[in-house]
Image (tube, grey):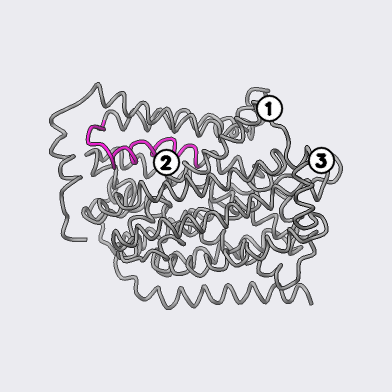
């Protein structure tokens, strides 16, 4: 009976999304509708779409479990950082300026932003290739997070479950792109907020935690609030900074700003996205930080990626709530998959094929090709998910390489006319070369190279991601300062003041 109620809840959720897709998909008529929703999204739609793309089973299952295991209650700092730096500061600094330039110049993708700002077609093509290839590990990490949910909470073969999720993500994207995805994200965002609020209430009250008094006692133990050494603080801060500032250079996050209707909606979105992040990220990491109240390391503590699903199972939550929690994890993951898939597919079709291969492609052809690449992307993600790489590692490889490469030339361009093409290339290549080190070591490890150096480096994705982002910013500034060219003034003036009339 319990399983019937859970599956009924999941089925209702899927049916609602399909109906949203069928109704909203009819409104998607152009490539601009498909990629940026006609630039008509309000604050709630934009902010919740941003938030649901930000947080998925990767955070709830992978990161929450891993940080809780390693740092106890200190892991909550990651959720606070996500809210303050990844939402509040990101929206305050990036949303209005990005909305303005993308609206004036009718930009549809992040690689196109780079071409217009730096007058470089090769930069656009390179960005498209990197985005498509290295968003795959992140998408795969979402599948891995859902695999543990299927195994522990539903007791079914994870292959069947992941196929269902993949098909649902493909349908939502191909029905109508951004329009369908944003409206589905709105529903999923509401589900996530209600689900996390209920989950926090019931988990704190469960026998393992023992209410507020039990929580206070837990915080006084070495396992609950451990004394961290210097190395542990570096590791924790690297996780906080990567998962917070990493969003500043990710196309699936940046392109949410492209669809905002006007400045008023962008300002309102700052508050909505921040509150959402505090509840979802703060709540998710907080639950993971309680793992030592449930299990003992070396005795019955599950593997990092299975800690949170087992905690939910052992909390003896009401059946209906358990169904809601599973839908919460599905909502978070499907919305992220849709955003990532759409960003990757549009980058390859609009910014790679239509620029480097077939320059006379019509909008209808671009839309169709984007859908084809979205399907290909989902299939590749599923294959990578089966390499059994830890969730945290896969996400750090993806976010590190993409944000390490593109955060600096994107953010600095919004604020400075002095950043030029050589500076942007220097920042991109520096960040890319640094951030790819852990991922390259993982590939070597898959090829049976197991030297101590390789094994150590492949687990340091967050640290290398942070180093890459900082180094990229410095290289952008330094190289631009020493290679100023008057000939670039016309290009930059158009970028900051020009208007393109046709979409």
Which residue is drawn at the image coordinates 60% and 28% (left, top)?
457
Q: Which residue is mark 3?
A: 297
Along the horizontal axis of the image, is 201 left or right of 241? right
Disc with the residue nearer the chain's start (2 vs 1)? 2
Q: Is residue 294 magenta?
A: no
The N terminus lies in quadrant = bottom right
Q: Position of residue 164 (x, y in %)?
A: 60, 65
Mark pair 3, 2: CA separation: 39 Å
Along the horizontal axis of the image, is 181 left or right of 200? left
The reply to whether the C-beta atoms of the residues labelled 3 and 2 are less than 8 Å apart is no
Mark pair 3, 1: CA separation: 19 Å
Determine whether the residue tagged by mark 2 lies in a helix, strand or loop: helix
Which residue is drawn at the image coordinates 64% and 43% (left, top)?
75
Determine whether the residue tagged by mark 1 lies in a helix, strand or loop: loop
The C terminus lies in quadrant = bottom left
Q: Which residue is mark 2?
A: 130
Q: Position of residue 228 (x, y in %)?
A: 69, 31
Q: Give the residues drawn in magenta, as a range.
A: 399-421
């Amino acid at each position: 009976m319990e399983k019937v109620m859970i599956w009924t809840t999941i089925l209702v959720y899927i049916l609602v999304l399909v109906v949203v897709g069928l109704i909203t998909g009819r409104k998607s008529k152009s490539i601009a509708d498909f990629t940026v929703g006609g630039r008509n999204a309000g604050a709630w739609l934009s902010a919740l779409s941003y938030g649901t793309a930000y947080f998925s089973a990767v955070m709830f299952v992978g990161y929450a479990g891993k940080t809780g295991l390693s740092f106890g209650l200190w892991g909550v700092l990651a959720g606070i950082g996500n809210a303050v730096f990844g939402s509040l500061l990101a929206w305050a600094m990036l949303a209005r300026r990005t909305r303005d330039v993308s609206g004036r110049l009718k930009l549809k993708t992040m690689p196109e932003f780079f071409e217009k700002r730096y007058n470089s077609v090769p930069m656009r093509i390179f960005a498209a290739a990197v985005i498509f290839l290295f968003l795959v590990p992140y998408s795969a990490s979402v599948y891995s997070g859902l695999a543990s949910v299927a195994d522990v909470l539903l007791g079914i073969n994870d292959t069947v479950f992941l196929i269902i999720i993949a098909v649902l993500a493909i349908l939502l994207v191909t029905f109508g792109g951004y329009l369908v995805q944003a409206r589905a994200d709105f529903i999923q965002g509401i589900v996530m907020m209600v689900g996390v609020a209920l989950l926090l209430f019931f988990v704190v009250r469960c026998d393992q935690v023992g209410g507020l008094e039990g929580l206070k006692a837990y915080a006084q133990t070495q396992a609950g609030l451990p004394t961290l050494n210097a190395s542990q603080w570096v590791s924790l801060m690297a996780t906080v900074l990567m998962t917070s500032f990493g969003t500043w250079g990710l196309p699936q996050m940046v392109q949410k700003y492209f669809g905002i209707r006007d400045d008023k909606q962008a300002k309102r979105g700052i508050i909505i996205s921040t509150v959402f992040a505090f509840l979802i990220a703060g709540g998710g990491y907080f639950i993971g930080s309680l793992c030592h109240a449930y299990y003992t390391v070396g005795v019955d503590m599950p593997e990092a990626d299975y800690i949170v699903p087992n905690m939910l199972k052992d909390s003896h939550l009401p059946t209906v709530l358990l169904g809601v929690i599973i839908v919460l994890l599905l909502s978070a993951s499907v919305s992220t998959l849709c955003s990532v898939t759409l960003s990757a597919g549009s980058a390859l079709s609009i910014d790679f094929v239509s620029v480097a291969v077939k320059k006379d492609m019509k909008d209808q052809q671009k839309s169709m090709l984007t859908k084809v690449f979205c399907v290909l992307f989902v299939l590749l993600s599923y294959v990578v998910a089966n390499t059994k790489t830890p969730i945290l590692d896969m996400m750090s490889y993806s976010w590190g390489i993409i944000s390490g490469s593109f955060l600096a030339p994107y953010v600095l361009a919004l604020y400075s006319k002095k950043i030029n093409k050589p500076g942007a290339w220097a920042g991109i290549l520096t960040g890319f070369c640094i951030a790819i080190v852990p991922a390259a070591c993982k590939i070597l490890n898959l090829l049976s190279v197991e030297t101590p150096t390789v094994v150590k480096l492949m687990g340091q994705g967050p640290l290398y991601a942070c180093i890459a982002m900082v180094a990229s910013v410095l290289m952008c500034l330094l190289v631009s300062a020493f290679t100023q060219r008057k000939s670039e003034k016309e290009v930059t003036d158009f970028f900051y003041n020009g208007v393109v009339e046709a979409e």
